Image (cartoon, helix red, strand yellow):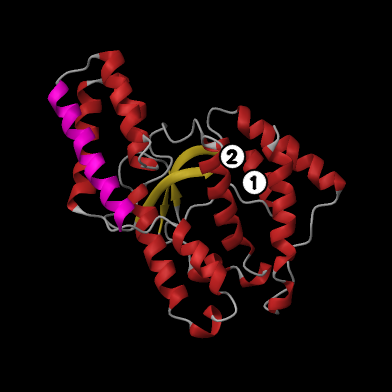
Amino acid sequence: MILQPILIALLGLLAGASAQAGVARPVPSLDPAGQAEARRLLDQIRRDPRGPFGPIRWYCTDGRVLPPQGAPCGPGRGFQHASPSVAAQQLTRLDIDVARFLANMPFEEFLDVRRNHHWLRQIILLDYLTTTNDGWIYKRTWSRRGVRQAEDEEASARRLLRQLLQDPVWLEPNYLLALQLTATLPHGIDTARVRRIRALSTELADQNPAFFSLRAKIHSRPGPEDIPAVEAFVRQQNPTPPDRFHDLVRLMRDEYSLANTA
């Protein structure tokens, strides 16, 4: 898979790119053995239908990690998403983080001063690889229910970006990085229309079980690519009620046309 060595090479470049910033020592490039191990693990993840993720868990704000059933953390006291797979955990030891979530992430962990903002650069790089390579290692993961909660990721991205952009001392030497992060992180407003899209997709999946994987995608990592996917589903499956699917497409068209003009 050609993008695996590209990922490793780019991570090496990004690790050393800002050594002059003086924040901390950059993450060293992988040696040949580390590169070979990273390629092996990435190939294993690519072939796994779950991608870099393991079981779904609740992550409570008090530190508990609980099974996915119900709401065991209490109202507003937890976030549900997938845990990292064994292969993803092994990649983390190589400073390649492919299974992290922003939900409830402390700002210090997000900023990653210890590794000279290595995590911030990885966010940008992973988004690039995902959007330019048809989902990359995540291609089959977002159709699994509970892997990622878009509303939690967006709310946390807004919180983290707000704190980051309020620090002029950090911004001055890291302006380009801040611009790239602002363009990359999912920090849109949770509007009534977005909530309606989620609710309607759930309603339609309840009535049409074959729509479940698309419903999960819309809830976990929504994007304009969902529009042709839903249209193709309607053509191929002839689901009921068709008018409700047309309503969903209309809502998504309105949402993403507005986002593109913002």
Q: Can you give x and y, in whole percent of width and height, for residue 44 in the image? A: 67, 31
Badge 2 vs badge 1, beta-carbon distance below 8 Å: yes
- The Cα atoms of the two marked residues, 2 and 1, are separated by 6 Å
Give me the residue at 18% from left, 43% from top: 196
Amino acid at the residue labelled 2: Ser
Q: Can you give x and y, in whole percent of width and height, for residue 235 in the image? A: 28, 16
Residue neighbourhood size for the residue with mark 1, other residues' Cα within 10 Å, grouped as few (<14), some (14–19), many (≥20): some
Furthest residue toward bottom: 169
Q: Is residue 85 left or right of residue 260?
A: right
Q: Nearer the viewer, residue 145 or 168?
A: 168
Furthest residue toward right: 32
Amino acid at the residue labelled 1: Gln
Residue labelled with disc 2: 85
Residue labelled with disc 1: 89
Q: What is the span of residues highlighted in magenta in the rendered image? A: 242-262
Does 101 appear above or below 141? below
Does 17 appear above or below 233? below
Q: Can you give x and y, in whole percent of width and height, for residue 27 in the image? A: 74, 63
Q: Quadrant of residue 253?
A: top left
